[in-house]
Image: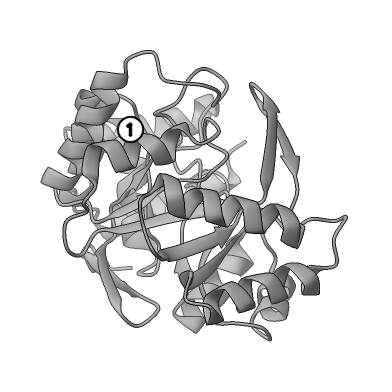
């Protein structure tokens, strides 16, 4: 593990994007429901992210619902050249913090058409299945995505919270260009999936990339952060950038100040000793 890392990743063979992107879940109300408390600040966050070099923004129709996609379009459309907006479908929202999986073709059809309209796009460049639905045969969901891609409504397809076996199943229907699973320096449950995507040159997009709540782990992070005159959040993000070249980061925030702090993660150069110390976090609980 060297102390340098590639700053970009080419998604699906044709989108070269900066590996430090932005996740737009937090530009919504409490419980990821309704409008944000400070809409103007959220608009500023989106504009500032692009100014700072972000060219990959991750969202979903379920964030709000609809609110996140609408704010992205309000702030950034018509979109600058090279900006990739990835969105997701597969959740039905019934209230704050309530997430109900629905990946039936009928729901995904409605979700996809809604995303196209809200994002003011003719095609979604990256459409990710938010969850495989245990109530629906996976083949039905995959066939819908395959057909939508053939119709030109979707350019690339990704998956979220999936196992290696599920990725391989989906690959029988379409090229999987991204996998979005929970992962952080102190939560490595999906390590096998990360390594599989790396071998396949598939982007791995960790959600909840900063972990949290692990006091002993935070003490270790603080030690490395002090050495680099950085915050523990920046160090946690930097570890991911150093650890695997296919990891794309999408830390989210509704604050310009916090956004600017997160973006400095790309400037940290972790050495071998730092990486070994941080690697030990996987064993600290």
The furthest residue to the bottom: 172
In the rendered image, residue 233, in percent from the top left (x then y), is placed at: 34, 34
What is the quadrant of residue 248 in the picture? bottom left
Question: At which x and y percent is residue 113?
Answer: 54, 55
| Residue in front for this viewpoint, 188 or 2 | 188
Crowding at mark 1 (Cα within 10 Å: few <14, some 14-19, many 20+):
many
Using the image, determine if residue 274 lies above or below residue 123.
above
| 146 sits left or right of 261 in the view | right
Q: Residue at x 55, y 29 (%)?
A: 214
Image quadrant in which the N terminus is located: bottom left
Q: Secondary structure at mark 1?
A: helix
Residue at the farthest top position: 37
Query: Residue at image x 54%, y 82%?
Result: 150
Q: How is the image coloured?
A: one colour
The count of marks equals 1
State the image coordinates of residue 61 (x, y, percent, origin top left).
53, 43
Could you tell me residue 31's position as x and y percent?
57, 21
Q: Residue at x 55, y 48 (%)?
A: 282
Residue 164, above or below 135: below
| Residue 112 in sight from this viewpoint | yes
Q: Which residue is mark 1?
A: 232
Q: Nearer the viewer, residue 115 or 157?
A: 115
Q: Is residue 71 left or right of residue 205?
A: left
Image quarter in which the C terminus is found: top right
The front one of 255 and 188 is 255
* In this picture, residue 207 sits left or right of residue 108: left
Up/down of 238 relative to 255, above or below: below
């Amino acid at each position: 593990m060297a102390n340098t890392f590639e700053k970009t990743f080419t998604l699906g063979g044709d989108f070269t994007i900066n590996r430090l992107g932005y996740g737009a879940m937090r530009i919504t109300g409490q419980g990821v429901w309704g409008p944000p408390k400070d809409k103007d600040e959220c608009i500023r966050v989106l504009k500032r992210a692009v100014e700072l070099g972000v060219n990959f923004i991750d969202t979903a129709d379920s964030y709000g619902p609809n609110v996140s996609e609408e704010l992205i379009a309000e702030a950034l459309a018509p979109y600058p050249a090279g900006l990739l907006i990835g969105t997701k479908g597969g959740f039905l929202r019934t209230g704050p913090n309530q997430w109900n999986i629905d990946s039936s073709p009928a729901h995904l059809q409605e979700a996809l058409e809604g995303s196209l309209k809200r994002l003011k796009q003719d095609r979604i460049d990256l459409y990710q299945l938010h969850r495989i639905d245990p109530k629906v045969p996976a083949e039905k969901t995959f066939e819908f995505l395959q057909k939508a891609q053939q119709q030109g409504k979707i350019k690339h397809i990704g998956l979220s919270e999936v196992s290696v076996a599920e990725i391989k199943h989906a690959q029988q229907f379409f090229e999987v260009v991204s996998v979005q699973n929970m992962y952080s320096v102190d939560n490595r449950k999906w390590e096998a999936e990360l390594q599989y995507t790396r071998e396949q040159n598939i982007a791995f997009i960790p959600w909840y990339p900063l972990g949290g709540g692990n006091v002993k782990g935070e003490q270790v992070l603080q030690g490395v952060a002090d050495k680099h005159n950085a915050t523990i959040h920046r160090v946690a993000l930097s570890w991911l950038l150093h650890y695997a070249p296919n990891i794309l980061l999408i830390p989210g925030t509704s604050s310009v100040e916090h956004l600017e702090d997160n973006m400095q993660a790309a400037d940290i150069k972790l050495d071998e000793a730092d990486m070994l110390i941080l690697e030990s976090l996987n064993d600290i609980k």
